[in-house]
Image: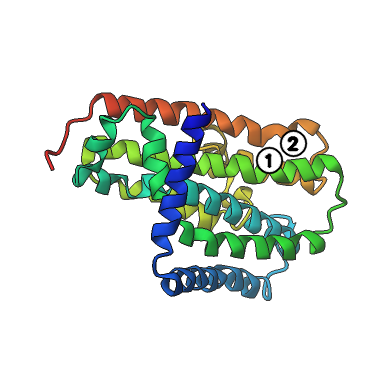
Amino acid sequence: MVFKMKLYLNYICMNLKSQMQYKVSFFLTIFGQFITAFTAFFGLYFIFSRVSAVDGFTNRQVFLCFAVIMMAFSLGEMFGGGFAVFSRLLGNGEFDRALVRPRNILLQILMPNMDFTRLGLLLQAIFVLCYAIPISGIVWTWQKVVTLGLMILCGSALFFGLFLINAAFSFFTIEGLEFMNIFTYGARQFGRFPFSAYGNGILKFLTFVIPLALIQYYPLLYLLDKEKNVLFMFFPVAALLFLIPSYGFFRFGLSHYKSTGS
């Protein structure tokens, strides 16, 4: 087990070193992503210069919601970056090479393909979170601190599962399906507001089908004392169950994989 962990850590270190071969380009890319991501923040800021609340949530509360989604997405994308380029791995034959190695196939995909330039988006999310926490008006207790941590960590795992599903479709189409971006990159955009703002039908879909509301809307109610039931604190943990069908679909696709011959 120790040997395997060292091997995978070496994968990560080699990947980081390769991305930092051109240090100026690497840090400029991070800086560019940091600045570009602020367009969404400023857009939200200007919206609230005209509107004081959305579906009963004040602008300060919405900023917290925005920060949580951004941080969860950035972590999920950084660690699940290998799935974003999975169709390329299938097309150029790199996936076939990984299949013949006696190591976990998922880790072989993820470790060498972590995109450290996504740190720019993560830094922006941290900045917004640090801005949102003191102005949110929340009376922080240890339960609420844990809830916030669960929202971010379980949210990143949920986005990881969505990227995994997108990769699994590539087994059948060779190229990934664009509609999955609605639930990944799209969720980063419409997750700026509490999901209840989009209507009851959307909220139910994002609760029982793609459980994004479990890591955003319901625990947010608990943080803001709009819901006193302590079970709302653990709703993000329930979202982890989504990883089971995500991984199952990936294994199903893998069992039907036919090499492209590259």
Discs 2/1, front? 1
Closer to us: 120 or 195 = 120
Label 2, label 1: how far apart the Cα atoms are? 8 Å
The residue that appears at 27% across and 23% down in the rendered structure is: 255
Within 10 Å of disc 2 (Cα), the crowding (few <14, some 14-19, many 20+) is many
Q: Earlier in the sequence, mark 2 or mark 1?
A: 1
The residue that appears at 50% across and 51% down in the rendered structure is: 187
Within 10 Å of disc 1 (Cα), the crowding (few <14, some 14-19, many 20+) is many
As shown in the figure, which amino acid type bears the numbered disc 1? Leu
The relative height of residue 76 versus residue 171 in the rendered view (above or below) is below
Closer to us: 14 or 211 = 14
As shown in the figure, which amino acid type bears the numbered disc 2? Met
Please tell me the numbered disc located at residue 175.
none
Residue 251 coordinates in the image, percent (x, y): 35, 26
In which quadrant of the rendered view does residue 99 lie? top left
Q: Name the residue that disc number 1 marks.
A: 150
Residue 17, visible in the rendered structure: yes
Residue 164 coordinates in the image, percent (x, y): 41, 38
The relative height of residue 104 versus residue 137 in the rendered view (above or below) is above
State left or right for residue 217 relative to residue 231. left
Quadrant of image for the C terminus = top left
Q: Name the residue that disc number 2 marks.
A: 233
Closer to us: 8 or 91 = 8
Element at badge 1? helix
State left or right for residue 78 relative to residue 222. left
The residue that appears at 53% across and 44% down in the rendered structure is: 202
Element at badge 2? helix
Residue 161, visible in the rendered structure: no
Q: Could you tell me if the residues under marks 2 and 1 are in contact, i.e. CB atoms within 8 Å?
A: yes
The relative height of residue 136 versus residue 256 in the rendered view (above or below) is below
Residue 98 coordinates in the image, percent (x, y): 29, 36
